[in-house]
Amino acid sequence: MSWIIGISALALMALIAGLILGFAAIRFRVESDPIVEQIDSILPQTQCGQCGYPGCRPYAEAIANGDELNKCPPGGQATIDKLADLLGREAKPLDAAHGEEDIKKVAIIREDECIGCTKCIQACPVDAILGATKQMHTVIADECTGCDLCVEPCPVDCIDMVPVEPKPERWKWQLEQIPIVEMNHLAELGQTQANGSNEAETTKQQQVNG
Amino acid sequence: MSFYIASSPHNHQRRTTATLMNIVLLAMIPGFIAQLYFFGWGVLFQLGVAIAVACACEALCLMARDRSAMMGLRDNTAIVTAALLAVSIPPLAPWWVIVIGTLFSIGVVKHLFGGVGQNIFNPAMAGYVLLLISFPVQMTAWLPPASLASNVPSFLDSLHLFLFQYTSEGYSVEQMRRIDTGTLLDAVVMATPLDHIKTQLSQGLTLGEATQHQQFTGIAGMGWQWVNAGYLLGGLVLLQQRVIQWHIPGAFLGALAVCAIIGSVFAPDYLPGLNIHLFSGATMLAAFFIATDPVSAATSNRGKLIYAALIGVLVYLIRSFGGYPDAVAFAVLLANLCVPVIDQYTRPTTYGYQREER
Amino acid sequence: MAIEITATSRLWNFPGGVQPDERKSPANLQPIQRFPLAPMLYIPLRQHAGAAGELCVAVGDYVLKGQPLTIPGVDNGLPVHASTSGTIKAITEHPLNHPSGLSGLTVHLQPDDQDAPYPHQPIADIHAISQREVLQHLQQMGIAGLGGAGFPTARKVAGARNIDALIINGIECEPYIVADDRLMREHAAKILRGCELLQQLTSAKSVIFAIEDNKPEAINAVATAIAETSSTTIANIILRVIPTKYPSGGEKQLIQILTGKQVPANGLPADIGILMQNVATAYAVAHAIDVGEPLLERVVTLTGEALHHPGTAWAPLGTPVEYLLQQSGFQPSKHQRVIIGGPMMGYTIANLQVPVTKTTNCILAPTASELTPADAEMACIRCGACEQACPASLLPQQLYWHAKAQDYDALKQHHIVDCIECGICAYVCPSQIPLVQYYRQAKAEIREQAIEHQKAEIARQRFEARQLRLEREKEERLEKHRRAAEARKAAQAARAAEAPTSPSAADTKPSAGKGTNAAVQAALARAKAKKAAQEQPDSSASIGPSAAVQAAIERAKAKKAAQAAAPEQAEPVADKGPSAAVQAAIERAKAKKAAQANAESSQSAEPAPENNTQSDKQDAIAAAVARAKARKAEREQAKGNTESQNNAAENERKGKQN
């Protein structure tokens, strides 16, 4: 008799616990984006294809299906770390086979050399190049992701990838990178003021070098 | 000629860590002199050895951690730790006790946790607790105040005792601790007032009977009350110099006082009163010099109040109901453990926010 | 909730704060000076918080004093004006008055020392026109907040509704700075006139004039001016004297002192019925409305022990800092610091050619003994001094740990964005940790991440839109093919029905002049040719001869000719800067369009007059075509050998450059 009581007591407890768990699962459900969305939102969206997939979204899907995390050079180590954190996987160093982390660049078309072939327009993954057949093309710099994909198709090699120019309002307070201007001319400054523009030139030069 | 690029602010309050530590050391002088006067030269030896060992240990640790030893030593924090430990242990404790304590304080509690500013425990108190539980005999061998002692060791005797535990004539520390009772030859071995009360109470005596003893002249026991008064004076200097804020000493002494008053209202015969609690043991040293260690204390003002009040209550509880006569070290370490929680819950409300969500 | 403040109502306190050495004297002892004009003024196009306007002058133009150099762009920015009359010598990159030392587009104006004025546009009665028009006038006059960040005043006033109290900030709490002090002493009446105008613009119920108690002369001057002003012009104006404490001049802190209220986080003072303006701004408003002259100069404090004659001066905007220092007897030392602003919040500059802008209230040249540079940073001892002193009740220590660990989420949680960068934490730090620098870097990084994230989001949307479009186009193409096939079938069926005697019904190839449906076949052929032309837009195409390709070639020729004939004035400015280049590009594009229109209408590639030919243009085109040919050839011959190809292209380019 006692074993019946034992079993039914256990069954009852299991039932109650199950109900509680079931209730909690519904009541306290944590809404979360599907994992692909989350991965995609971490990727830099340059759509450059250096990972070997045609865009960031496909790579996000591939990661969700178990591909390596370290194939995204534009995102660099920061992106790898974030992905590793999200997925609970090990953060590996960037896979050099897919390219190296580089400073941010933007494409510029040398406009007088452009022959208006539209090949770069077709190559741009984010439609950031404007132009039409036989018309000069130009890059919408703000929309350019610096993916490099337009450089190769250009038949006249008129697209340059140039580093994004630093803007004062987006400057990150790297005081130690400010070039120091010698002011030896201060003594004779009373006579000439013309040094001004020269000095500006030197400053810029140093900045580019530094 | 070239330009100097610097970030704002371009002017600074010229008060470095080293300056602050120097003020702390200077403020310890009144209490230290009282201790020297009542307990003899041993205190000085403890201090000297502690400082030497602390500096050496600090330098070695810094070098082992690839830091500049000179830069690290310059902030004087190691000296303060050494001084606090030195004045906490019995003056004639053997030299190796203070050496072990200091090594532990600096090497383990401070540098293994990451050096200045990273230690979660007060190094001096952690060192003290290590010594207390490792060497209970040596660590409770306090001398009687000089005016009561049957033998007051001379400078050389003290040095001899400190180094070899015997005077040059062959007296042991035990013998030095005897009190000149006048009539009885087999004199009582001295204990600190708090120790004495604890022992007597545990033997079934009432507080009144326990404090009949001749060392309880004045308000809280001969010698000790003056040492405490000395540290109180130094503490007031620190407050005046704005090296410390009132929050920690205030809350600590306040909590201890409230507990003591409540205790003596409910059990006047068994629980020591306000005078004993405030002016005996390490109360004032703790209030102004130990609990105020910024590294291991809570950060915000409210947090500091809670932190110090916690120490006060713990000190009272351990003194009254625990196994040890004094409890500052344990109380401080326990409160150190609570600091992260206290900090978490006492964040000040940032400008422009209503009472914020956590 | 209305804010009611009387002359005797309670003053509140804000947490923290410090009292550094004032050192306002001796700079505040001398009246505001006026130096001769600098030999060259550098007027940056962007001097306020917001985007720069569009240039409306060109190099070589003669401009009058007060003539606008830019017109505000789409975002309602502020124009900049010529601070004096003279000739524009250049419009180029010049070091900006900014902590970064970066350069920006700047108008180089050489004064002619005539100060010939541009016609003034005073407003006689602001009630005669709408508030919007007055604000537009203020915008045209380039009025920005002269106290701090340089926020456009018109926009600040426009954004403020239901204002209870207009606070006029004459606190100037930072050590050394005395520009507002001197202005209040010497021009209290005009400042009050500005207050009156601002009150009328905002319909504020009361005006509170706040001055720190370390400026007794300024307090006297303002009190006298208030007494002299009839109470009908300014309703409820109250002068409040505030105890000296840094940073009580901060907008949020001053509001807390005066009202006991806090501006909600991420909110504006207007949310609690307050608008604050600096005394210098009030002065500028009065000047812009009563005199009708734009903001052309401001009072600048020139101080520090490296100067022989410290004082204040009216500096035309654009005056190089070097010139002002020199006029004050600058004796630089070996590692001289030149600080724009005060010692607490100012920034050092790396180049003395930077100009005075609308927000430059102080140029400080201290000696090393006067303001000792910070020692090496030592370990934090968690002393909590920073937290005790923080006026925003932040946890500077925690912020410091998190900033060091670059834990930006934790920093956001600790409200790093509410840090006002007043510098107190670093000022009191016994370990000499440059805390504010850490916060600024972290804030910049957080801002950058936000921008990057936003950009990534936009990029994703654009990518997805493009994918959709490609998908759609592909489907449309398929659909078109399907329909064409159907149409063909239908046509065949019809043909079969019409001419059952036709030789082969299955033969779809059109054969001209055969059968009765020759016309239909001709039409089909035309359509095909057209389609081929559409699908093959490349001019370097190798596709067979068709009318369309012929036309393309003709167009290309026309283009070349048109480019050769491009207006000459576009060329000299092409290398002067981005906006000049854009203009040139626009002109080029226009020329091209015109040429194409010509070509299409006349159907003949009539070469443009040869005497205008610019050889470099043609060279460029020729080089491009040559390069393309070379590349194609190389591709065919040495496929895969990209190395040599790049080299060839590189050499070509070099050759062209030479």
Image: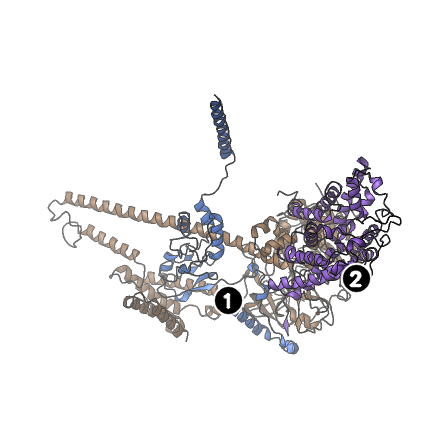
- Residue toward you, B150 or B58: B150
Determine which of the numbered discs, if any, sits on residue B168 in the image. 2
Determine which of the numbered discs, if any, sits on residue B138 in the image. none
Where residue A80 sits: x, y (%)? 47, 54
To the question of a shared chain for discs 1 and 2, the answer is: no
Q: Which chain is purple?
A: B
The reply to whether residue C399 is in sight is: yes
The residue shown at (80%, 43%) is B197
- Residue toward you, B164 or C58: B164
Dot 1: what SS?
loop
The reply to whether residue B13 is in sight is: no
- Residue toward you, C164 or B74: B74
What amino acid is found at the position of numbered circle 2 in the picture? Ser
Where residue A171 sits: x, y (%)? 56, 60
Q: Quadrant of the C terminus of chain B?
A: top right
- Look at the picture and state if A25 lies above or below B310: above
Q: Chain of mark 1?
A: C
Where residue B8 sits: x, y (%)? 66, 61
The residue shown at (28%, 66%) is C636
Q: Which chain is brown?
A: C
What amino acid is found at the position of numbered circle 1 in the picture? Gly
- Tell me the CA gap for discs 1 and 2: 92 Å
